């Protein structure tokens, strides 16, 4: 019984750590993964580098994006930071 009492603060600390850091991060990763899988042609995105672009062609691991009227580049899906909704200003 006394040994359990000595581990109780450690268990409480781990529970606090889990609910304040680990669990929210896992939820954020799930949402980001779902967003990446839902990308379609014509969606407005922001890359991790801060570039705003329009998706021209989604592929398996990469997407082709249009930066302006003349520039189309291929981007790894992992570098999409967020999808910009039509009413949002980024």
Image (cartoon, rainbow, N blue to C red):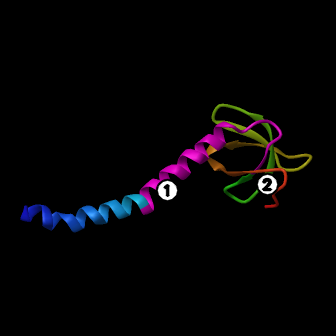
13 to 35, vertically: above or below? below
For the C terminus, the quadrant is: bottom right
The CA span between labels 1 and 2 is: 27 Å
Characterize the magenta stretch by its predominant secondary structure.
Answer: helix
Q: Quadrant of residue 60?
A: top right
Q: Secondary structure at mark 2?
A: strand
Farthest residue to the right: give it.
69
| Snapshot quadrant of residue 2 | bottom left
Residue 42 within the segment the image draws in magenta: yes
Label 2 sits on residue? 52
Q: Where is residue 79 drawn, in percent x and y?
A: 64, 49
Q: Give the extent of the magenta segment.
A: 20-45
Q: Residues within 10 Å of mark 2 (few under 14, many from 20)?
A: some
- The quadrant the N terminus occupies is bottom left
Give coordinates of residue 37: x percent, y percent: 64, 37
Q: Count neighbours of disc 1 (C-alpha within 10 A) and say few if under 14, some if 14 to 19, many if 20 or more.
A: few
Q: Residue at x 66, y 56 (%)?
A: 48
Which numbered marker is on residue 71? Answer: none
Does residue 52 appear left or right of residue 62 in this picture? right
Q: Is residue 69 left or right of residue 21?
A: right
Depth check, front residue: 78 or 9: 9
As drawn, is 27 to the left or to the right of 74? left
Question: Mark 1 or mark 2, which is nearer to you?
Answer: 1
17 lies above or below 74:
below
Q: Which mark is residue 24?
A: 1
Q: Is residue 87 above or below residue 57?
A: below
State the residue at coordinates (76%, 36%): 40
- Indicate whether residue 55 is drawn in magenta: no
What residue appears at the point 85 percent right and 46 percent down from the top-left corner? 71
Q: Residue furthest front?
A: 1
Asked whether 68 or 25 is in front, the reply is: 25
């Amino acid at each position: 019984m006394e040994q359990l009492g000595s581990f109780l603060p450690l268990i409480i600390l781990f529970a606090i750590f889990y609910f304040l850091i680990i669990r929210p991060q896992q939820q954020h990763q799930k949402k980001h993964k779902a967003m990446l899988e839902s990308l379609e042609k014509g969606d407005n995105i922001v890359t991790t580098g801060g570039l705003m672009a329009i998706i021209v062609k989604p592929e398996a691991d990469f997407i082709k994006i249009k930066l302006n009227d003349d520039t189309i580049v291929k981007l790894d899906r992992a570098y999409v930071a967020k999808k910009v909704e039509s009413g949002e200003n980024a």
